[in-house]
Image: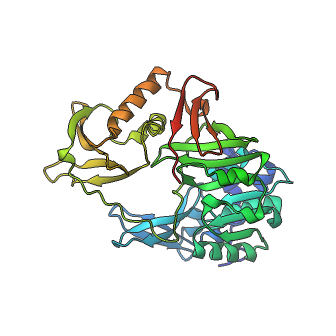
Amino acid sequence: MTATATPWRPHAHRLADDIATDGVLRSPQWRAALETIPRHVFVPRFYTQQPDGHWSETGHDSPDWLDQVYRNQPLITALATTARGNQVTVSSSTKPGLMIRMLEALDIQDSHRVLEIGTGTGYNAGLLAHRLGGDQVCSVDIGADLVAAARTRLHSLGLYPALDIAHGGAGLPGHAPFDRIIATCSVPAIPWAWAEQTREGGLILADLKRSVHAGNLVLLARHADRLQGRFLPRWAGFMAIRDTDGAPPDLRIDLTPEDGDRSTTALPLHPWESLIPWMLTHARLPSPLTFGYRGAAGAGGHQWAVFTATDGSWCAVAKDSRDGRREVRQQGASRIWDEFENAHKQWLDLGQPQWDRFGLTVTPDAAHQLWLDDPDSEHHWTLATTL
């Protein structure tokens, strides 16, 4: 179904109105892009996970497809099958309001050259190309099929940004320097290659996530000797950057939670319900964490939320609570849950500061320094870096 054959423009106008009502859409240039670039061309189908875990597909022949595509919501657009037969998401169309919030935060001007990390469907590259012209926009993705489909969609609309198939962590050095870099995938550390490809005074906006939910969008300015900036006030999250063009490996948790050292906690089952303390916890851990569940609810025993580190340390938190406390098991050199409890207490003692009081400094040696209020603050945390 083509853009011209589909009655999409009233839907696009309503989408722009909805985003403007949320206080996100301020620039007339970005409103024009939203109302001109047809999102449905980039989302010919999407997938919804059902309560039983399987995925259902909605395509252009479904009666509510067009209405769903032009709602201010993210849509899963590509699945992959793991070695154990599990279907997992590998690409999505970002919530348009979030995309506009990021583009507005980057303060993009007519003369700017922009690199997007994570082409995905190509929709955001389309918004950028409408605003700046295709010769000022580059986009990279590790997914060969994703890039090919995005290129076809963009060309059908007369848009010709430079697209490449590559690992986003390396940027796109052959097209540098850039005035702005925007990453639509999360990274456990900000690659210094992005700094090297950004003009001094330029900006990088990326989703720094040490592990699941442990971080936020951070806007960094390029200085001669560093990247430095603050986290955006509102939390957001993206799919993690992929190292290969395929499904990520299946998570295997080979442990018995009942064997760990025992304690209890009054904190939530999922640490990311306290997002900032969860981020600060990762300054105390040597590696990112993986997450999964063990046990079966209602089977006479606990169901556990399990966190594991690459050094073999793990912690497990029981889903069920008694008298407001949950059982905790831990084992290994890194006392994961103890570190979360300590970070949570420190955050409370600091007065529960929110995201916009935290900043980040990245230097060429890959050091990542978190700080509160000011780069020279007495309150700072060093993140071990991995990418």
Classify 30 as above or below 59: above
Residue 247 visible in the snapshot: yes
The image shows residue 204 at horizontal and vertical percentages of 69, 48
Q: Nearer the viewer, residue 360 or 320?
A: 360
Q: Residue at x 76, y 42 (%)?
A: 224
Identify the residue at horizontal 26%, vertical 48% (top origin).
Answer: 304
Question: How many numbered discs sit on the rendered protein?
Answer: 0
Check the image and name the residue furthest to the right.
Answer: 111
In this rendering, would 238 be left or right of 293?
A: right
| Residue at position x 33%, y 54% in the image | 292
Using the rendered view, name the quadrant where residue 143 is placed: bottom right
**Relative to 191, residue 267 above or below:** above
User: Where does the image place residue 114, in percent across and percent down from the top left?
Assistant: 76, 57
Q: Nearer the viewer, residue 129 or 1?
A: 129
Q: Position of residue 367 (x, y in %)?
A: 58, 41
Q: Residue furthest front?
A: 365
Q: Where the N terminus falls, by quadrant?
A: bottom right
- Which x, y percent locates residue 259? 18, 46
In this view of the protein, which residue sits in the foreground, 34 or 366?
A: 366
* 232 relative to 29 in the view: left or right: left
User: According to the image, what is the colour scheme of the structure?
Assistant: rainbow
Q: Is residue 36 shown to the viewer in this render?
A: no
Q: Is residue 281 above or below residue 351?
A: below
